[in-house]
Image (cartoon, rainbow, N blue to C red):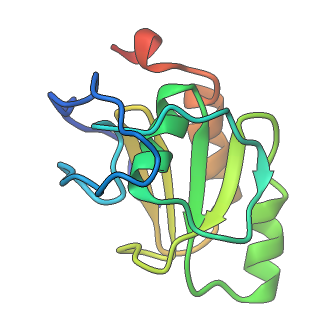
Amino acid sequence: CGPARREALDPSSGTHLLAGAPEPEYLSDPPTSGTHEPVPLLSGVRDEPLGRAAQVGQLEAGAVLLQHRDLDADQLATLEGLAGEGIVVVPNPDLPAPVVATAWLFKQTCEAVDVAALQGFLDEHAGATSAEHG
């Protein structure tokens, strides 16, 4: 995995979107801040991708998303083992790399499942809401 990087705060981060509204543009993809849907905090493994507005809503609430694409069964099982309270493993076919971890304002990109690096990201960012990360 590359280093975890802090991204710029999207100026539209205070804007809430109603469900079903058109998705806005984001400063990065997957986004780490911006206009978002106010959604209940998710945990665990999801089978369906989240829209970007829902992703940002999760991050604002303190979740960490471990998004993935094109993983073999063993790597997917290893990644899913990291899921937990406020840690969501979710597919995303549009990622720039096989695994991307996102938290509010932070992102780490991985070419493969690296448990030590991803656990470090989780330890640093899981449960940190937008108010705590500023």
Instruction: Work out whether residue 85 can be spotted.
Output: yes
Asked whether 22 or 53 is in front, the reply is 22
Please name the residue shown 68% across and 44% down the image: 119
Left or right of 129, for residue 45: right
Instruction: Work out whether residue 4 can be spotted.
Output: no
Q: Position of residue 33 (x, y in %)?
A: 32, 36
Q: Quadrant of residue 89?
A: bottom right
Quarter of the image with the C terminus is: top left
Please name the residue shown 75% across and 75% down the image: 76
Please name the residue shown 19% across and 31% down the image: 12
Q: How many marks?
A: 0
Q: Position of residue 107 (x, y in %)?
A: 39, 46
Whether residue 53 is situated above or below residue 81 in the rendered picture:
above
Asked whether 111 or 133 is in front, the reply is 133
Left or right of 79, for residue 21: left
Asked whether 11 or 66 is in front, the reply is 11
Whether residue 117 is situated above or below residue 114 in the rendered picture:
above
Left or right of 47, for residue 111: left
Please name the residue shown 36% across and 42% down the image: 32
Q: Position of residue 44 (x, y in %)?
A: 80, 50
Q: Quadrant of residue 125?
A: top right
Q: Position of residue 97 (x, y in %)?
A: 42, 75
Q: Quadrant of residue 6?
A: top left
